[in-house]
Each structure stands twice: as C-alpha cells, then as structure tokens.
Image (tube, rainbow, N blue to C red):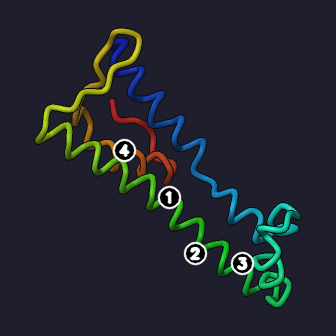
Amino acid sequence: MGKELELYKNFIDGLVERKNSVTALWVKGDGFPKIADNKAKNDLLATLTPEQKDVLAEMLQDEHIAGIHTTLAYINKMMDLDGLELHQDGESYPNDYFESLHYDFISRCDGDEWPE
C-alpha cells in the first residue's frame, strides 16, 4: 500500500475516533459544564427522565455523525468536480479509491474493515 493510501486511511480512521458527540455525552451524564451560559440547557435536562435523555443523546449523536458525513460529502464533491486536492506530508490523498470519503467514514463507523 502506498503512503498516500495509508494517510487517507489514517485520516478517515481519525474521524471515526472522533465520532462521539461530546454534547450527547453531557446529556446522558451530568449535564453541560456548570457555567452561566449553560444554565438553561442544564435546567431543561433536569426536567427529563433518563429515557428522554437517552433519546435526546441518540438524536444528538446521529446529527454529529451526519455533520461529519455531510462535510466529507462536500469535500468529495469538490474533489470530483472542482479539482480540490487534500495533501499531507507531500502526498495527495487518493480520490474515490474505495468509494468516497463519506461512504468510507460511515463504513468504518459501522465497523467494516478496509477493503483489500
């Protein structure tokens, strides 16, 4: 495997490592950091049952992953249509080597192995 493909895989896997929403974790945990700007949020969370917090956290988690997916889809579109290139360590990331940035991200989030 070439260096550019290894960099690409590391990039996608790095995003997968960051897929968990901190906001969702706060909702399920002890709430937002205890500062004045978060008082209304924490007051709302205090009114929710644990089951409602789980549903809200799941919605936030889904949106966090969707945001990464949408960003990668846009980058992929720019690479396909507008000549955008991603470079690291002097190497250009391969474009659509497997499927696409966003597809590869979701596949790795789902636990799929990298194709051969």
Kind of residue at disc 1: Ile
Going from the N terminus, do you reach mark 2 or mark 1 first? Answer: 2
Q: Position of residue 102 (x, y in %)?
A: 34, 49
Would you name the residue on which mark 1 appears? 65
Give left or right: position of 35 versus 57: right
Q: Which mark is residue 54?
A: 3
Dot 4 falls on a residue whose secondary structure is helix
Q: CA distance from mark 3 to mark 4?
A: 27 Å
Q: Image height check: is 53 above or below 114?
A: below
Query: Which mark is first along the chain, 4 or 2?
Result: 2
- Under circle 3, the secondary element is helix
Type of amino acid under label 4: Asp
Picture quadrant where residue 88 is located: top left
Mark 1 falls on what kind of element? helix
Of the two numbered discs 2 and 3 on the same chain, state the one appearing first in sequence. 3
Distance of mark 2 from mark 1, alpha carbons?
A: 10 Å
Residue nearest the viewer, comparing 101 with 67: 67
Are there few (<14), some (14-19), or many (20+) residues within 10 Å of tag 3?
some
Which label sits in the foreground, 3 or 4? 3
Say which residue label 2 marks: 59
Residue located beneath label 4 in the image: 104
